[in-house]
Amino acid sequence: MLGSSYYSRMPIQPPSRTLESPLRDSIDTLAADEPPTIVSLSDIHGYLEEARSALLTLTDHPDTEPVVVEVAGQLHWADNNYVLVFNGDLIDRGPDNEGVLALVSRLLREAPPGRVRVTLGNHEAMLLARDQFGLAEWYCGRASDADRRLYCEAIEQGYVVAAYEGHTVTYAHAGSPDPYDVTAVNDSLVEAATELSAAVGTDRDLPVQRRLPDDYPTVLGTGDSHLKGPTAGLVWLDFSHLPADSPPQVVGHTRHDSPQTKGSVHCQNVIRNTLDRPGGEAVFAETPEGVSAVVRQADGTTERQPLA
């Protein structure tokens, strides 16, 4: 479903300063004294109200501090000891893509550096490669060249990344069955964004879009027989191709009715499969001791569920 309106410029506006490695890539810089809890949410897909419900599960749970506070109908950074990870696919399908992007932009600007992280989802990758995928009926396919340059800039500044290293797991939209170096894949995404940004609006634009998955396969690679097939990269791989002995990670991308665990891989894509009933929205919370889900129940209460 398309958004209710379309802005001429994509409203993701991180701070103007660049977020350098290691703060860009890892919790380590922030965890020296009092390790923050990492809260993560994936696959919002333009469903702003469901995203609000998920983010407010911590507010509504009796044993957790809020990650956001509501003021005059808007969510703002709560200034507690958290890192908040939006684990890909902010856009497409839902009714309020602009509202979701405005929320993420606001939290990026309000939170201290490194406290809000955004990983690249396949729908953001399709926005960057707008002409290659040609999905004019979706928000990503209607992005202007200015939108695409802005998103490239957010990658180059370190606010949108391929992966983020937590306490015990790594966050990426679709994940990998094999170990990888987080700084290396984030550097490669910056290289891809810089190359694409220089080509946007020129006669090199479409050839560069088509070449990037082959040039940067660990991040942007698509499967040989299917976009989400077993050879796909961190943005595209289907959960079914992550074996139980994969490295510990939190992913989204593949839809489920409830949080899923396979070995040390945890999938948090639950919003779209619970749209037709009350509750079901969830965030994950990671401490050095492990990962749990905080899930909205049908009666509006929230329940914390350890993940095996």
Image (spheres, rainbow, N blue to C red):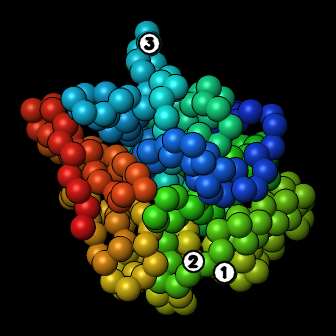
Tell which of 17 and 205 is nearer to you: 17
Q: Position of residue 214 (x, y in %)?
A: 71, 83
Picture residue at 55% right of the left edge, 81% below the top: 179
Q: Which residue is mark 1?
A: 217
Q: Secondary structure at mark 2?
A: loop
Mark nearer the N terminus (3 vs 2): 3
Residue occupying image coordinates x 49% and y 59%: 167
Find the distance from the CA under tag 2 to the CA under tag 1: 6 Å
Residue tagged 3: 71
How far from the left and from the top, in percent, is residue 21?
76, 56
Q: Are marks 2 and 1 in contact (CB under 8 Å)?
A: yes
Is residue 194 visible in the rendered structure shown here? yes
Closer to the camera, 281 or 149? 281
User: Is 44 on the left or on the right of 56, as rendered?
Assistant: right
Q: Earlier in the sequence, mark 2 or mark 1?
A: 1
Q: Say which quarter of the image contains residue 211.
A: bottom right
Which label was assigned to residue 233?
2
